[in-house]
Amino acid sequence: MKIPKHPERTKTPSAPAAKVSIRIGKRTTFDASVTTVGLLSVGALVSSILLSSAVIVAAAGRKAARRPLALPDHTRANG
């Protein structure tokens, strides 16, 4: 059985989709470039993190509403 080759999948992009250069002070410079696939993966990671944190906050809010951590002041026995 012959495995088909897909040359368009193995090509590396000639130009990055985004470039950033950050300069701190007089000597320090950070350069970064990201391809389209990299931007898509970063977007997927950020959206999944935001969705998961929203679920955690919602679950914590439901539990706190059911069972308060302390009794209100007017029900405590003064002694």
Image: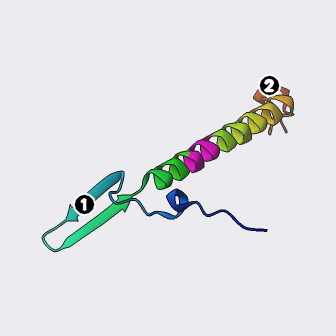
- In the rendered view, tell whether residue 37 sits above or below residue 52: below
Tell me if 43 is positioned left or right of 74 in this view: left
Vertical arrangement, residue 50 with respect to residue 3, above or below: above
The stretch drawn in magenta includes residue 1: no
Can you identify the residue that label 2 sits on?
Answer: 74
Query: What secondary structure is marked by label 1?
Result: strand
21 vs 40: above or below:
below
Magenta residues, as a range?
Answer: 44-50
Q: In this view, does 76 lie to the left or right of 48?
A: right
Query: Looking at numbered disc 1 in the image, what kind of residue is underneath it?
Result: Ile
- Outermost residue, top side: 74
Q: Mark 1 points at which residue?
A: 22
- Describe residue 25's horizontal placement relative to residue 7 as left or right: left
Q: Position of residue 8 (x, y in %)?
A: 51, 57
Q: Nearer the viewer, residue 63 or 45?
A: 45
Frontmost residue, 59 versus 26:
26
In what element is the residue under mark 2? helix
Which residue is rendered at x = 65% and y = 39% of the image?
Answer: 51
Residue located at (76% from left, 39% from top): 60
User: How far is the residue under mark 1 from the one under mark 2?
Assistant: 57 Å
**Residue with the most extreme front position:** 1
> Which label was assigned to residue 3?
none
Residue 53 locus on image (x, y percent):
66, 43
Residue 27 % position (x, y): 16, 74
Q: Which of the 4 image quadrants contains residue 69?
A: top right
Displayed quadrant of residue 68: top right
Magenta stretch, overall SS: helix
